[in-house]
Amino acid sequence: MNTNFRVCPETGFHVHKPAELLMKANAVAAVVFLLVGGTFGLLVGLTRWPAVHLLPADQFYLVLTAHGLNVLIFWIIFFEIALLYFCSAVLLKCRLATPKLGWVAFALMLIGALLNNYIVMQGNSSVMMTSYTPMGADPLFYLSLILFAVGALIGTFIFFGTLAIAKAENTYEGSVPLVTFGATVAAIIAVFTIVSGAIILIPTFLWSVGLVAHIDPLMYRMIWWAFGHSSQQINVSAHISIWYFIAAVVFGAKPLSEKVSRTAFLMYILFLQLASVHHLLVDPGLSSNYKMFNTSYAMYLAVMASMVHGLTVPGAIEAAQRARGFNKGLFEWLTKAPWGNPVFSGMFISLVGFGFLGGITGVVMGVEQINILIHNTVYVPGHFHATVVIGTTLAFMALTYWLVPVLFRRDLVMKGLAKWQPYIFGLGMTGVSLFLMGAGTLGVPRRHWDIGFAGTGMTHDFPAAAYTMMALNGMSVVLAVVGGAAFCIIIVASLLFGRKLGEEKSSPALAAEMVTDDEYKTLHASGGITVPGTLCLTFIFFASFAAYYFINWKYLSQTWGIS
Amino acid sequence: MSPHDVPPENEEIPFMQRLLDNPFILLFLGVASPAVLYLIWGIMEIVSIPLGK
């Protein structure tokens, strides 16, 4: 037997040991940066809570910069690199391409992330994550991001190299598994994202050291968002792959239709990154043709792909549950789901939050006319806390609960707390999203230390409801931070003090037996609609979508009356 | 297609499946599509703005 591989007693996976070490390193780094970024997030939330208003203005912008970079870039991309290695080397049962280069990539990412935190803490790079020119940061700020991006790009190409190795060595037959296909889509989007980042950050670095005279602000914004927003599209593909994966390991569910799911992923490849234009909808100099094609046409195709995934993942779970006998009424398959298992509850809250809160509001933001209602207000962070935090972070947390015993061979500690953690975090973040979006609809600007502009000579009074919602947002932040901290404590404590599992199997089993074709046949033999519960949820989703969409047009009609 | 649904050897693999099975063609599409429709189109629009005098 090849000593470079071990067979996982839980799942039967053939795990390439050098790949496993790299996955562990990237996953641990991810959780550390989540802890750091989440702490900064608490300080941001407490400062935006009007009655608390914790930090002075200069420290607020410093902390906001650090929060954005640590959670939106470092936590998520470290985790995604671990995920790419898992979806290639482990799921395809092959060796990882160039593990040594993987360590170079990890070192570059770690140095970049640490350097970035150090330089932001110096106080002269409080330019927020977007770092719009002509607002300048320390040259090391740009250099640190470039180092991190180069490391991430190397990691992404190691993933593609591993796919080539698996193909060449025939470690799988037919097509790659759907989860690996979704990870491939994430990696493809990552390549475009990182190259776009290099196109704009390298000249900006040269500008910061005086070698380039001028960076055009409009050009910067346009190219930066190819990096800034696409980086969040990597997350979408990654967390949807995790939804499919968790449906398989918790329920033994097969996708309803591989063809449909893969076609939806193809639509991401072609259209998802174009949605970045919604950040530019009020920028001068860009035509309506450009704005409307990329948002109101291309983006809708990407949204349709997300709706396909939003239907097929719960649909696959429902079909598997019904095939196993949970057939009563519309929702027995859902009520009898393992809601006490954080792997499932985290994934399902991620799915619902991403669809209902993040997805619907994302479409509203992508419509040129109604975007104007909320452009540059706190509605925008409200939206992306639903997509990136409830959607991506919670899915990553759910998968981590599964990976700790599988990869690290440690039993989880504090299982009672782990059972509640996705609910605490999900509820807190749902509050953050809803209250920020509510305040944003009332016009509260984003990125402002003091929404009343006190002492500036141009004060503005918002309705009392806006201040109430910012206060409720602050309370929700505290709840979410409690949930986030609980996750970090459980994972770190499990890695340090969790019972070593060795060759012992967990009970209950970490990976369910896959539902057999014969079991599915009993489901189809009953006739009628195979997944009626999911179809019912889909109609609720469409009704919510339509109602919210037209409510926004109503708001718009009241903003500018026609006489 | 799942790994269990491998077609018989004499059956031609459909075009869409061959496309979806080739990560490097998908990589080309995934970079070319936003590069043309987002970046290049956007750059052309910005550079065609007349300079202020």
Image (cartoon, coloured by chain):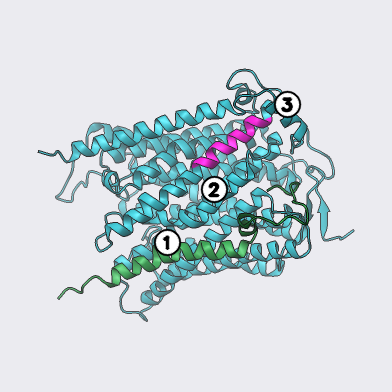
Q: In terms of secondary structure, where does tag 2 sit?
A: helix
Q: Chain of mark 2?
A: A
* Disc 3 + disc 1, Cβ < 8 Å: no
Contact between marks 2 and 3 (CB within 8 A): the answer is no
Per the rendered image, the range of residues in magenta is A307-320
Mark 3 — residue? A522
Task: Inspect the magenta stretch and tell me whether residue A309 lies in it.
Answer: yes
> Nearer the N terminus, badge 1 or badge 2?
1
Q: Quadrant of the N terminus of chain A?
A: bottom right
Query: Considering depth in this image, is A59 or A135 the residue closer to the camera?
Result: A135
What shade has chain A been given? cyan
Please state which of the two labelled residues, at mark 2 or mark 3, is closer to the viewer. 3
Which quadrant of the rendered structure holds the C terminus of chain A? Answer: top left
Q: What is the residue that sits farthest to the bottom in this orientation?
A: A211
Residue A209: which quarter of the image? bottom left
* Chain that bears disc 1: A
Q: Amino acid at mark 2?
A: Ala
Indicate the secondary structure of the residue bearing disc 1. Answer: helix
Q: Nearer the viewer, mark 1 or mark 2?
A: 2
Q: Which residue is mark 1?
A: A226
| Residue on which the image places disc 2 | A264
Of labels 2 and 3, earlier in sequence is 2
| Prevailing secondary structure class for the magenta stretch in the rendered image | helix
Q: Residue at x 35, y 39 (%)?
A: A437
Residue A136 can be seen, yes or no: no
- Estimate the x, y position of residue A398 in percent, counting from the top left: 61, 40
User: Crowding near pointer 2: few (<14 within 10 Å), some, many (20+)?
Assistant: many
Mark 1 closeness class: few <14, some 14–19, many ≥20 residues within 10 Å: many
Distance from label 3 to label 1 (Cα)?
48 Å
Q: Amino acid at mark 3?
A: Thr
